[in-house]
Amino acid sequence: MSLARSSITRRRALMTGTAAIAAPFVLPASSWAQGGPIKIAGLVSLTGSGSPFGPNSRQAHQAVVDEVNAAGGLLGRKIEYLAEDDQTNAEAGIRAARKLIDVDKVQAIMSVWASAVGTAVLPLCWENKVMMLAISAADSLALLPHQGYFVRTQPHTELQGKEFGRIALALGAKNFYCMMPQTPFTETTFKAIRETAEPKGVKVTTVIFDGKKNSFRSEIDEMMRASPDVLMMGGYQAENIVMAKDLFRANFKGKVVGFAFGMTPGFIDGAGKEAAEAMYGCAEPAPAGGSAAYAYLKKLVKKDTLDTYMCQAYDHVNLAILSMAKGKDGTGTTIKDNIRKIANNDSAIKVDNALDGLRAIAEGKEIKYAGASGPCKFSDIGNIIEVAFRTTQVKDGKLVEVKI
Amino acid sequence: MLEKTLQLSVNGLMAGAVLAVPAIGLTMIYAVLRFVNFAVAAHMAVGAFAGYMLNAWLGLPATAAVLGAFIAAGAIGIATDHVALRPLRGHRALTLAIASIALNIMVESTIRFFFGGGPRDYSIPLRRDWRFGFLHVGPQQVENAAIAMVAMALLFAFVMLTTTGKAMRAVADNPMLADSKGIDPDAMARIAVGIGMGLAGIGGMLVGLDTSIDPLVGFRTILSVFAAAVVGGLGSIPGAVVGGLTIGLSEELSLLMLPATYKSAVGFLAILLVLTLRPRGLLGVKAA
């Protein structure tokens, strides 16, 4: 074969090489490597009690997936991100998860917020070998036989209950009255509060109320008769709005603490500045504000401040992608088998975003993902290890971080 | 114990007065059309949001916005009934009731589409309770009860004193006979749906004035509303008032014996007891 008859010229070779380098960036989806896209999903709360946070989680997921796809995808394949609204409701969550798993064939379900949804959906995940990276905090979740298909970045409720007990003690409580709606984590939270506060001489009263009602006047009357000095108003945002108004009307003079997820700017708007003033938002895992991952996420989503759940959602999508890259396969089982290799390995090179992590893995290096929500290290049953809490207080209608 | 019982009774009566308004709406529609229209829940939300727009966006006083809530919920009630339920007239009551549940979901979803799922608040001042010895009551509770009573009084006057009201009662009593007397059952059905859903709208706004509103404000209340109508006797307007007060009192007084988490069960229990012991309800004249 003579050179003259060959179709390969230096110019064509150069063009071919350039095209090969540029291909991942410019070719349509159909040109990605065989096997189709790797599908991962966000099962987020766009409506209901979790609606103040779900849209941010979805944004974080999408931003990371877009960035990775723009840089060539994962294992030569495009990542397809799907998001479903669980309506902060177990029944809707199950329907959405079934669609994601049975129809869309996703390999990971990320950032499930409500414990009731997490509890309902987790069995579907492990039965279908789909990895769940969750926020849901109920202790019972990690104790289910999930075969490793579960990790969460939110501290479980026993830790949150202990934090409430610690705060009550720090606020000088002698008579601590705790009110929560029926949730999968109510009993464990109450138990942890009692175990923390009662040995120090604090009287703890616990009441589970019906969160589906429109008014809690009589429940507040009952609380007022007990004359507590500190009240735990342990509902979600919607219940807390109604309860805070009823507390104001009843002229309650004690201190009020609640879950930070129920003490949001929306809560202050709804309850009114007067009613919400001086209330504490507690047991919120502090985002790693000074971390490289936090700074990276701020830039990625173009926001000045990030809520803790957006940070966790960012960590979920990074962990899922990097685990699959580490295991060289785009499945839920690969995530399960590799997530601790990239999350718990303190001696490895620290990475704070998917692109750096993918590059390092491609170079054969060991990595340790350090996230925007914290160090992201997991126990054998999927609970987060190493948690820092923060407390906020409503001051002049604004949430301000305080040290207690 | 006496102090606690009296305070719970006050709370129950106030809540019951508000509950009675949508319960009358539900029972009125039942009286004329002979099916339980569960879309009352969504029309409570329609009224609540219409009132919210008038009050929070346009600055109308809450009492005036209540009238807007009635008109908006009534008008939308007639329109949705015309499109979704009217074509099914003649089918079994169960078919219509199931269709009304579907309609309810559609209307609630539409509200969520435009307003989102988060809670919203009326532009009214938050006031401390009035205290009378060991009893206390909120000014907003009293205003709500007063608005509810005015709405109920106007409705009674309409039903008892006007020709249209009498015609509606005739249709409710005996549709065939009313038809033979030249009363248009379709027109009566439209009026019943309009007034019934309008009352639901008032109920939704009254609930929201004391708490906050979101698209599920009616959904959370519908069990108590339905229980009130059943206890009073489905189809009986005075029965709905008695039923509303009974359910309001029962739910609050249940706290004397039951943990607060079982409050919702009171409505179910009331329905069960009435269906077992007195199926026509307290003031109903026919078996439901």
Image (cartoon, grey):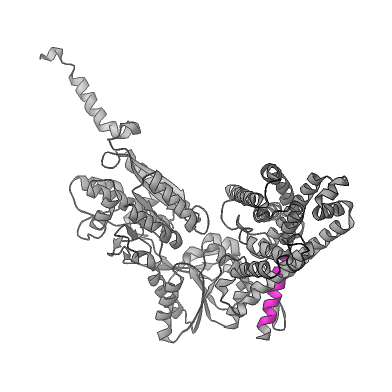
Q: Who is closer to the viewer here, A342 or A112?
A: A112
Quadrant for residue A77, please give it.
top left
Above or below, A16 against B211 in this view is above
Does residue B67 show up magenta in the picture? no
- Location of the C terminus of chain A by quadrant is bottom left
Magenta stretch mostly in which secondary structure?
Answer: helix
- Image location of residue B109, percent across then percent down: 58, 49
- Image location of residue B274, percent across then percent down: 68, 68
Q: Who is closer to the viewer here, A7 or A370?
A: A7
Res A57 seen here: no
Q: Who is closer to the viewer here, B276 or A269?
A: B276
Task: Left or right? Give the position of B88 relative to A193.
Answer: right
Magenta segment boundaries in residue numbering: B4-18
Task: Left or right? Give the position of A131 relative to B247.
Answer: left
- Image location of residue A168, percent across then percent down: 46, 78
Residue plotted at (66% across, 44% down):
B84
- Location of the N terminus of chain A by quadrant is top left
Above or below, A191 against A62 in this view is below
Res B178 seen here: yes
- Image location of residue A89, percent across then percent down: 49, 57
Q: Who is closer to the viewer here, B253 or A66?
A: B253
